[in-house]
Image (cartoon, rainbow, N blue to C red):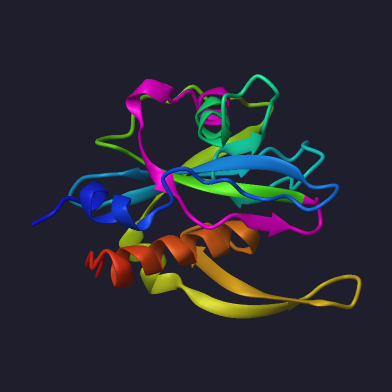
Amino acid sequence: MLDLATALAPHLEADPRPRPEAGDRLAAVLALVIEGEEPALVFTERAAGLSRHPGEVSFPGGLADPGDENLRATALRETQEEIGVDPAAVRVLGALSPIHTFVSAILVTPFVGTLPALPTLVVNDGEIARVLTVPLRALVAAEEQREVRAAGGGTWRGWWYDVSDLTVWGATGTMVHELLVVLEREAAWSIV
């Protein structure tokens, strides 16, 4: 039987080249899968004092810096800065579809990487309130589509995950949904 990384890698974009719209900024995040008997995703809860998306649950990552070689390097650098994961330890498999965050005009490329086990983390308290690992099985069980009325009168429709004491939704929810679809449908990896 194929391991999770071997099954997943062929269904991800090896060299993503997102095309931002005028005024968009590029960013990258890392959907970090901890392998093992019970594969799990690593999430961060953003610090309450941040100017963008405070308190929200997301993947580690952030805006591209001019010194980053590419968006893969951005995702790895930001993950190291936020939670202390050594970039050399991560097996990056490829990227999911870029996600546009309309509120903040950012085009985010989500990379998927694996680690055999969760290392000791060094959390940047200025950016991250806490780090959480959630089994993929729990995400599958919790997945639902929701509609949420925005303060400005619009409606957000997307994927929602209430797991334990956290809620994943928005752009991160879309990324989780795509990852689960790729795992189950494309890579034929049974999560449940």
Write the residue at 77% across / 37% down: 50
The image position of residue 40, as x and y in percent, is 34, 50
**Is 114 in front, or is 127?**
114
Q: Is residue 140 rendered magenta in the image? A: no
Write the residue at 37% across / 24% down: 120
Q: Is residue 92 rendered magenta in the image? A: yes
**Is 174 in front, or is 150?**
174
The image position of residue 49, as x and y in percent, is 78, 36
Write the residue at 61% across / 24% down: 68
The quadrant of the rendering that contains the N terminus is bottom left
The image position of residue 98, as x and y in percent, is 59, 54
The quadrant of the rendering that contains the C terminus is bottom left
Range of residues picked out in magenta: 78-105
Residue found at the very far left of the displayed protein: 1
Residue found at the very far right of the displayed protein: 152
- Residue 46 falls left or right of residue 60: right
